[in-house]
Amino acid sequence: MTVRVKVPGKVNLALRVGGTDEAGYHELGTIFQAVSLYDEIAAEVRPEGEFRLAFQGEGAAFLPVDDTNLAMRAAKLVAARFGVEDAGCALTIRKRIPVAGGMAGGSADAAGTLLACSELWGVGASVEELSELAAQLGADVPFLLYGGTVHGTGRGDVLEPLPAAGEYHWVFALSHGGLSTPAVFREFDRLYDPRPTELPAPLVAALADGDLAVVGANLINDLEDAAISLQPTLQHTLQLGRDAGALGAVISGSGPTCAFLTDSRDAAEEVGQALAVFSGVRAVRVATGPVAGAHVVD
Ligand code: C5P
């Protein structure tokens, strides 16, 4: 038997960064939106104690396949938490979410693996039970189980749905190198004092109204300057997309992927074409949001 799960990447429409807790994690106020760039996970039963992981697709060669990988840890966490006897599995993950791109690709794979292993071993875990395990794996992991458009607080793992109308057409400009999330947070700490973590009221109101022009004008990421400080070319990428007619431009999460909001597929294609010719951009992807979180497919 093979269980197949699709899991989306995410973009942050707002990312406010506050002070740190005793473990060094920053208090966040963020709006996550799940977007239609999916990783696909295939899970097969293996003999007891055999846990295998392989990646296919873009960036696959650079990813660890041992216990340092969040997906491997997710599989073992399900086995331990639900006391699965004879647990073993082979996971094959096809990557479409950019690696180290600020779109939560690694967290998505962990969320998808939690669901895939729960199905594979028939433990019948609820999404709330999987969400508890997800929070142990990383701050972004619980959101990828739910998807949609969500307000995240705490470390980004305390979630509350946000009213969001309309269809979002996104363009993502992928960068040549990745950025390390801890390094970007460290650079933020070097450059700035903690910020208030409240969401901008005009952004929340425009989301509820489906006013994409106002949403675009109010996209905000407190990590943006830190990411640009580590990869200065991102400044130019953002400006190119704005000049090409995007309603708004923002770095996704800790970067380096740049996200551009448009209100139609045609507008997204146009902005994408303008970005694709810039040497600082490795590749362009077009996607829509919001979409559902991790789900089993036939
Ligand atoms: O939770 P996750 O492992 O995805 O976070 C990666 C790193 O990002 C953390 O080790 C920390 O350096 C930084 N981080 C943070 N505050 C958060 C989330 C992540 O400082 N709320």
Image (cartoon, rainbow, N blue to C red):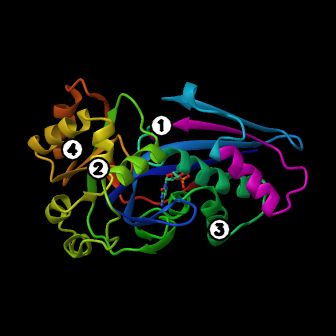
- State the extent of the magenta-drawn residues as a range: 71-97
Which label lies toward us, 2 or 1?
2
Q: Amino acid at mark 3?
A: Glu
Residue visible at 63% across and 33% down? 64
Which label lies toward us, 4 or 3?
3
- Disc 2 under 8 Å from ligand 1? The reply is no
Q: Where residue 268 is drawn, which disc sits there?
A: 4
Q: Amino acid at mark 2?
A: Glu
* Label 1 Cα neighbours within 10 Å, binned few <14 / some 14-19 / many ≥20: many
What's the CA distance linking mark 3 and mark 1?
25 Å
Which label lies toward us, 1 or 4?
1
Asked whether disc 2 touches disc 3, contact meaning CB atoms under 8 Å apart, the reply is no
Between 138 and 98, the one lying in front of the other is 138
Which label lies toward us, 4 or 2?
2
Sequence-first tag of 2 and 3: 3
Question: Which residue lies under the disc numbered 2?
Answer: 224
Instruction: Please tell me whether mark 3 sits on a helix, a strand or a loop.
Output: helix
Instruction: Please tell me whether mark 1 sits on a helix, a strand or a loop.
Output: loop
- Disc 4 under 8 Å from ligand 1? The reply is no
Question: Which residue lies under the disc numbered 3?
Answer: 132
Question: Which residue lies under the disc numbered 1?
Answer: 99
Q: Amino acid at mark 1?
A: Val
Asked whether disc 3 touches disc 1, contact meaning CB atoms under 8 Å apart, the reply is no
What's the CA distance linking mark 2 and mark 1?
18 Å
Which label lies toward us, 2 or 3?
2
Q: Amino acid at mark 4?
A: Ala
* Label 3 Cα neighbours within 10 Å, binned few <14 / some 14-19 / many ≥20: few
Mark count:
4
Q: Quadrant of residue 49?
A: top right
